[in-house]
Amino acid sequence: MRKLIFLGMLGTALVATSCSSNKSGVSAGEAQALRSDVMKLKGQWDISNIDYDRNYSVKPFDEGASINCFVGSSWTLIPNNYTGTYTLHGENGCPSKIQAITFSVDKNSVVSIKKVADGEKAKRVLAGYKLMLENPTADSFTLLQSVTADGKPMDIRYNFVRKGK
């Protein structure tokens, strides 16, 4: 009888183990490191320069404005509610615009940005942009956007510097 109970318990343990889910999330340490990197984004930023293949005409974020209009643009990022804005200052023939955004950063450092119109709920916005967060520090970071130009991959690097330091 004891053998039968023992085998029953062993069988139950094996079934429970084999049926348990394997979580693919992040560890507590990884989550803390990610949160630390995201919190570095908090504040006022300017795009100091943009690196890309200058043989192409690039119009970022569907603004219809040249990529040069984004150099010197101001960005406010608020990571505790993942909102912000970017401002094009209207210099050198560029449009003047303040655009509300929401953003998120996943465990692979992919930054998702959505443009949000006045009165619009971010959860209703389906379109957006995915960029890679590179080298976040207290004073600078880079967002890398990979696009296709003439059927070939091209990288655009938006280099941010903290404003007012």
Image (cartoon, helix red, strand yellow):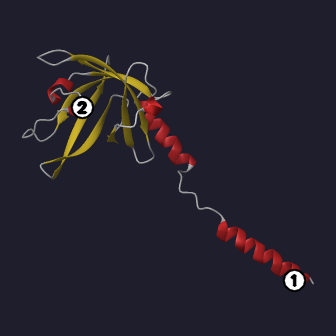
Q: Is residue 71 visible?
A: no
Task: Estimate the x, y position of residue 86 in percent, counting from the top left.
Answer: 31, 22
Residue at image mark 1: 4
Instruction: Classify mark 2: residues with Cα within 10 Å, few (<14), some (14-19) or many (20+).
Output: few
Task: Estimate the x, y position of residue 123 in percent, counting from the top left.
Answer: 47, 33
Residue at (29, 37) in percent of width and height = 143
Q: Secondary structure at mark 1?
A: helix
Most extreme residue toward the right is 1
Task: Estimate the x, y position of residue 50 in percent, counting from the top left.
Answer: 19, 33
Instruction: Classify mark 1: residues with Cα within 10 Å, few (<14), some (14-19) or many (20+).
Output: few
Q: Give the Cα distance between marks 2 and 1.
A: 69 Å
Most extreme residue toward the left is 55
Which image quadrant: the C terminus? top left
Residue type, numbered disc 2? Asp
Residue at (15, 52) in percent of width and height = 152
Residue at (52, 41) in percent of width and height = 32
Viewer-side residue, 28 vs 54: 54
Q: Please, is residue 137 above or below residue 22 in the view?
A: above
| Callout 2 touching callout 1 (CB < 8 Å) | no
Q: Secondary structure at mark 2?
A: helix
* Front label number (2 vs 1): 2
Left or right relative to 145: residue 115: right
Left or right relative to 141: residue 80: right
Viewer-side residue, 63 vs 103: 63
Left or right relative to 83: residue 144: left
Residue at (76, 77) in percent of width and height = 11
Q: Is residue 7 visible?
A: yes
Residue at image mark 2: 62
Task: Estimate the x, y position of residue 164 in percent, counting from the top left.
Answer: 32, 16
Which is more N-terminal, label 1 or label 2? 1
Q: Please, is residue 56 above or below residue 122 in the view?
A: below
Which image quadrant: the N terminus? bottom right
